[in-house]
Image (cartoon, rainbow, N blue to C red):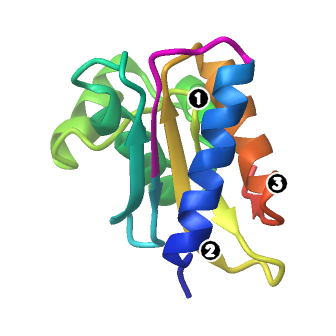
Amino acid sequence: MSLSLADARRIADAALEGATEKGLTKVSIVVTDPGGHIRFALRTDAQGIFGVETATAKAVSALGFNRATLALAPLFSDQATAAINGATGGRFAPLGGGVVIIDGEKRIVGAIGLSGGLPEVDHAVVVAAVETCGLSTLK
């Protein structure tokens, strides 16, 4: 099971609203299916050229390790991070802002990644966005 396009957009819109409320202006948001394929992406006018790739990497990293990316950073040395990043073609970002999305039956339906703020802020925004839309995240 995967998120519908409408649900993916709703989650992204909620994340954009949350980011805006936190004063973030340079934001990229990517919602993926359970396989890490982009379902919906957006970026603000002020966001730079790496935002969508970073947000995607956060979402994919959360899926790859079945946990929020905020919890990944302390688990990996710089050498391990570089090795995993190389093995995944640059799709590993152990920085806060990526979470796995689960439905009411605890099934993984996708992930979301946000790039634009401090790791803790990005994390809080995506968790709130997912919960606002009636879904949950893996911790």
- Residue at mark 2: 108
- In the rendered image, which residue does mark 1 sit on? 96
**SS class, disc 3:** helix
Of 76 and 114, nearer the camera is 114
Would you say 119 lies left or right of 114 here?
right
Instruction: Please tell me whether residue 42 is drawn above or below residue 51 in the rendered image.
Output: below
Q: Nearer the viewer, mark 1 or mark 3?
A: 3
| Residue drawn at 49 percent across, 20 percent down | 116
User: What residue is disc 3 on?
Assistant: 131
Is tag 3's residue or tag 2's residue first in the polypeptide sequence?
A: 2
Q: Which stretch is magenta?
A: 22-30
Rendering coords of residue 120 (x, y %): 69, 20
Amino acid found under the numbered disc labelled 2? Ile
Q: Is residue 71 visible?
A: no
**Amino acid under disc 1:** Gly
- Frontmost residue, 85 versus 132: 132
